[in-house]
Amino acid sequence: MNTSNIHWYDACAVDDIPKRGAVRLAHGSKTIAIFRSSDNKLFAIDDACPHKGGPLSDGIVHGDCVTCPLHNWRINLESGRAEGSDDGCVSTYPVRTSQQRVYVELTEVRDIGFA
């Protein structure tokens, strides 16, 4: 049986994320990239391109998209979907700010059962 707890994780200060850049957040076995656009919008997505797993946090941010540094796939930061003729998507995570801190909504899953 699985039980889930949703909580807001205090990831970093807003100013820790460069404009048109990203920071990485380790969460279990995956890495989440938190992006800041040139107009200060914040986004959080899985840090692995759906094409070949390239580190999206190393990509070029333009508007509400990031271009993967490996093969130029363009990923929409709001929806997590690949744009253009590419097909695929990454998970997205809600983000909020409070007192200049960035919070990412994460789900912790705990397995409860019998051996």
Image (cartoon, rainbow, N blue to C red):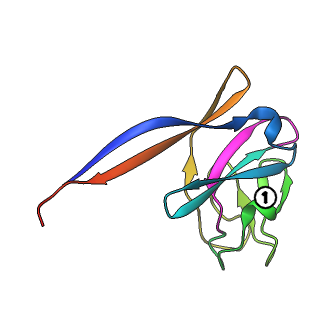
Q: Quadrant of residue 16?
A: top right
Magenta segment, which residues?
37-48
Give percent across and percent down for residue 42.
72, 39
Residue type of the residue flagged with mark 1? Val
* 27 horizontally vs 33: left or right: left
Q: Residue at x 84, y 47 (%)?
A: 63
State the residue in front, 69 or 101.
Answer: 101
State the residue in front, 75 or 105.
Answer: 105
Give percent across and percent down for residue 46.
60, 59
State the residue in front, 57 or 88.
Answer: 57
**Is residue 53 within the magenta segment?**
no
Q: Residue at x 75, y 59 (%)?
A: 57
Residue identified by numbered label 1: 66
State the residue in front, 33 or 71.
Answer: 33
**Is residue 44 within the magenta segment?**
yes
Q: Quadrant of residue 103?
A: top right
Give percent across and percent down for residue 35.
75, 47
Q: Is residue 12 above or below residue 87?
A: above
Q: Residue at x 20, y 54 (%)?
A: 112
Q: Quadrant of the N terminus?
A: bottom left
Give percent across and percent down for residue 7.
45, 36
* 103 horizontally vs 67: left or right: left
Outermost residue toward the left? 114
* 5 horizontally vs 101: left or right: left
Q: Quadrant of the C terminus?
A: bottom left
Q: Residue at x 78, y 58 (%)?
A: 66
Q: Is residue 33 above or below residue 39?
A: below
